[in-house]
Amino acid sequence: MSKLRQTKDGLLIPSSLLKGLTGPVSVQREGNVLFIESEQRRTARRRVARMVQRLRQAAKGLKNLTTATIAREVAAVRRKRAGHR
């Protein structure tokens, strides 16, 4: 059995597709997507989603965005992050 199969009771996922997952596994359905992932990957995915949400909110406040403005912001963030290392 190497393919996914949908039955009247649900979705059958062969163990060969789940071999790379170690430790606890998170299974979550969002819309028409089924996420089967390790807890670490789930945490990372959620962290990225939060960052994207914050970036989108911040972008709403910026109206006249130029290449120079973006370069200044990137440089400021890099300076700040360099101080934390």
Image (tube, grey):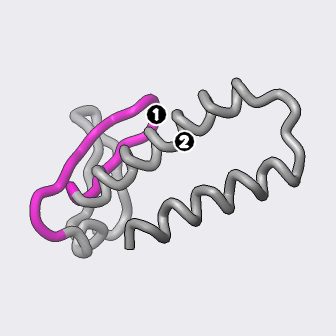
- Using the image as rendered, state which of residue 66 and residue 44 is in the foreground: 66
Q: What's the residue at 89%, 45% (across, down)? A: 66
How packed is label 2: few (under 14 Cα within 10 Å), some, or many (20 or more)? few
- Place of residue 12 in the rendered image (x, y in percent of width and height, measured from the top left): 26, 51
Q: Amino acid at mark 1?
A: Asn
Q: What's the residue at 67%, 62% (across, down)? A: 75
Asked where in the image residue 62 lies, by quadrant, the reply is: top right
Query: Residue 77: within the magenta?
Result: no
Instruction: Indicate the quadrant containing the C terminus: top left, top right, bottom left or bottom right.
Output: bottom left
Q: Which mark is residue 52?
A: 2
Asked where in the image residue 65 lies, by quadrant, the reply is: top right
Q: What's the residue at 44%, 68% (across, down)? A: 83
Up-down: is 75 above or below 54?
Answer: below
- Count numbered badges in the picture: 2
Could you tell me which secondary element the residue under label 1 belongs to? Answer: loop
Q: Is residue 21 left or right of residue 52?
A: left
- Using the image as rendered, state which of residue 59 and residue 34 is in the foreground: 59
- Using the image as rendered, state which of residue 50 and residue 9 is in the foreground: 50
Magenta residues, dominant SS class: strand
Q: Which mark is residue 32?
A: 1
Q: Is residue 41 left or right of residue 75?
A: left
Q: Amino acid at mark 2?
A: Val
Magenta range: 22-39
Q: What's the residue at 57%, 65% (across, down)? A: 79
